[in-house]
Amino acid sequence: MRRAPTILHLDMDAFYAAAEQAAKPSLRGKPVVVGGIGPRGVVATASYEARVFGVRSAMPTAQARRLCPNAAYLNPRFTLYRQVSESVMELLRALSPLVEPLSLDEAFVDLEAGGVPAETVAVRAVGERLRRDILEVTGLTGSVGLAGAKMLAKIASEAAKPDGLVVIEPGTERELLGPMPVRTLPGVGPATAETLRRAGIHTVAETAEAGEAELVRLLGKAHGSGLYAMALGRDDRPVVAERDAKSVSVEDTFEVDLTDRTRVRTEVLRLADRCVARLRAAGRSGRTVVIKVRNYDFSTLTRSETLRGPTDDPAVVREAAVRLLETVDTTGGVRLLGVGVSGLADFTQEDLFAQIATEREAEEQAAVAVAGAGPDVEAAREPEPEPEPPRRWHPGLDVVHEEFGAGWVQGSGVGRVTVRFETPWSAPGRVRTFVVDDPALRPGEPLPLRGGPDQSSAPAIRPKSVSGADGAGSASGEEISRR
């Protein structure tokens, strides 16, 4: 444990929803929900205006629609979120060489490694400047927690939301944590919390009072000992600059259960190709192929196969995924499918036997095709190109119209698509409706949130209080300290 609050935790406020509000002036100050919009979709992020109605992350979208029917429900735009995230991470890397990203919108920073004096006044000044820089660069707000340990810094940033800064002074940890529910501690999920509840343990203070031996008896050696240390406010985990990924995976949830075995196989092959594309984009290979199958009754099965060496060959991954699928009964209906690769490496040692078999099969198929085509195979007509699938206009999608310019899809149906034409730096725009195959309308790319003409500096998330001119004495600079 450090003697000064030099570990910083940044958590952007309602990140996906806030980015959408910043990009779409007509949605500012209104409830926005980002996630899967189908009947089986799940909420990724809800704006603070939507949270008032009880909408939360990981909630089924159907339930969110019942709670807040007038919200804007949008598909995620990860291209935009990654662009904004990179701008934020650059600001963090300017503070210290030790930056540990947890997700697109969350990271730890070791300020001591960046040369910041180990004093509360100095680290607070850095945190306040970071918040101002993030607002200036992205137009979004973030909450900052400062403490002497990672666990406490994360608790502090949660207490600071939205758009605040909280400092936990070293030495006040146990008094602060004591009355908090045990779910506050990292690693305490519903199952662990229920085990502790049955033992009469509800708060962090009660967890510490139970003692290490009792927690080990209830939860096992590793989990019990770790939980006891955290209940005392002890967390010596360092900030790690490079977090090595352990696996790469993709999955899809289907609006209607898949019962056709051929369709299930086709989807697994498609997911395998997507997984390999992500694997190659990361410059990695892997030796264990995993499939995930969630049935109609929500029961979930996983199957894995370890290859002789790491690979990034799509044919090898596809073959392994299909072999694994053959071991799973899908006759009752499949709700979700996933394909992943683990055991990652930075090099490739191809599975030569599988590769040779694939090449031989392709040669045999080509020979059969030539034999059946007769002597005029060279003169055979080229196959007609397949017709392009109809364009799908998902809510929130960026579009460009030849006459009206940039906008975004509000909704579509019965052969029509409704578009609102506005940009991040414009006033709320007008709405127009087109036929879905209008040749003048095409998908577009996300526009930057800052830098346009007449760009407003108003944040997408309203702060809890209005700071003074110099930021001193504001509620956003609250300090948790009991002396």
Image (cartoon, helix red, strand yellow):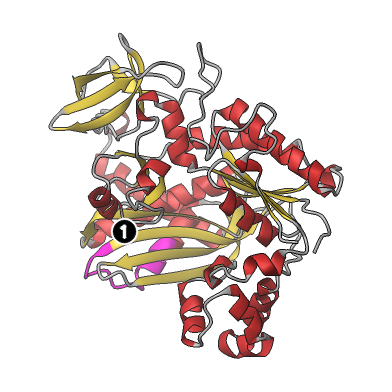
Dot 1 lies on which element? helix
Above or below for 66 versus 458: below
- Magenta segment, which residues? 321-334
Q: Which of 458 and 38 is in front in this view?
A: 458
**Quadrant of the rendered structure where residue 87 is?**
top right
Dot 1 corresponds to which residue?
265
Amino acid at circle 1: Arg
The residue shown at (35%, 56%) is 59
Is 459 part of what is drawn in magenta? no
Residue 89, position as x, y percentages in the image: 66, 38
Q: State whether residue 478 is above or below residue 187.
A: above
Q: Which of 376 and 89 is in front in this view?
A: 89
Residue 480 x %, y % = 67, 55
User: Dot 1 surroundings within 10 Å: few (below 14), some, or many (20 or more)?
Assistant: some
* Residue drawn at the location 67% of the way across and 86% of the way down: 211
At 44% across and 25% down in the image, what residue appears? Answer: 445
Q: In this view, does 84 lie above or below 182?
A: above
